[in-house]
Image (cartoon, rainbow, N blue to C red):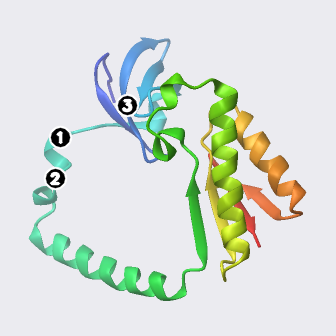
Amino acid sequence: MKFKVGDIIVFKHEKQCGTILKIVNGKLLVKNSDGFEEIVSSNDIILYDENTDKVTAYGIDFDIKDNQIKKRKTKKNQRFSKVLKIDLHIELIIDYYKELENHEIVNIQLKKCENAIRKAMNTRIEKIIIVHGIGVGTLKKEVHQLLDQYNFRYYTSQDGGSTEVML
């Protein structure tokens, strides 16, 4: 497929989209929806088409069927869910993060994480998913050190953006 600068794309293996900034030797420099630039292969992306990204493109029958399946899954998950998901992205925790230094941001994120861990330990939660993001890895390293203090068994997700903790 031919891509050009300015095309909006969707990543095949991630739940993200982006915009093509530059094309060099078959590799594409893409700015993803998180604002990060990355070099990708044309095999890893799909051109975003506004016309086919609407419910009407698939017809009304599919929409009704999908809604019925979602309703059933939601009820089942609510009854048996013993998983706590913590998103440590700073913009979701506080509003005034732009004035803070990096170490202050990491400390706020770690406090939020530790409070959630304590809450999970006092309830019937069996697993915690800590979303720390991919980034440079500073927050992930600090979260793993915190988990080591509690002697928890944990696993990093395949994309490296989250950690699953078994309680």
Q: Which residue is mark 2?
A: 54
Q: Please tell me whether mark 3 sits on a helix, a strand or a loop.
A: strand
Q: Give the side of residue 80 with respect to residue 3, left or right.
A: right
Q: Please tell me whether mark 2 sits on a helix, a strand or a loop.
A: loop
Pinpoint residue 28: horizontal percent, then vertical percent.
46, 20
**Quick one: label 2, few (<14), some, or many (20+) residues within 10 Å?**
few
Q: Give the side of residue 79 with respect to residue 167, left or right.
A: left
Q: Amino acid at mark 2?
A: Lys
Q: Residue at coordinates 18% horizontally, 70% vertically from top-left?
A: 63
Q: Quadrant of the C terminus?
A: bottom right
Q: Which residue is mark 1?
A: 50
Q: Find the distance from the CA under tag 1 to the CA under tag 3.
A: 14 Å
Q: Amino acid at mark 3?
A: Gly
> Which quadrant of the figure has residue 142?
top right
Q: Residue at coordinates 48% horizontally, 37% vertically from top-left?
A: 44
Q: Residue at coordinates 89% horizontally, 63% vertically from top-left?
A: 151
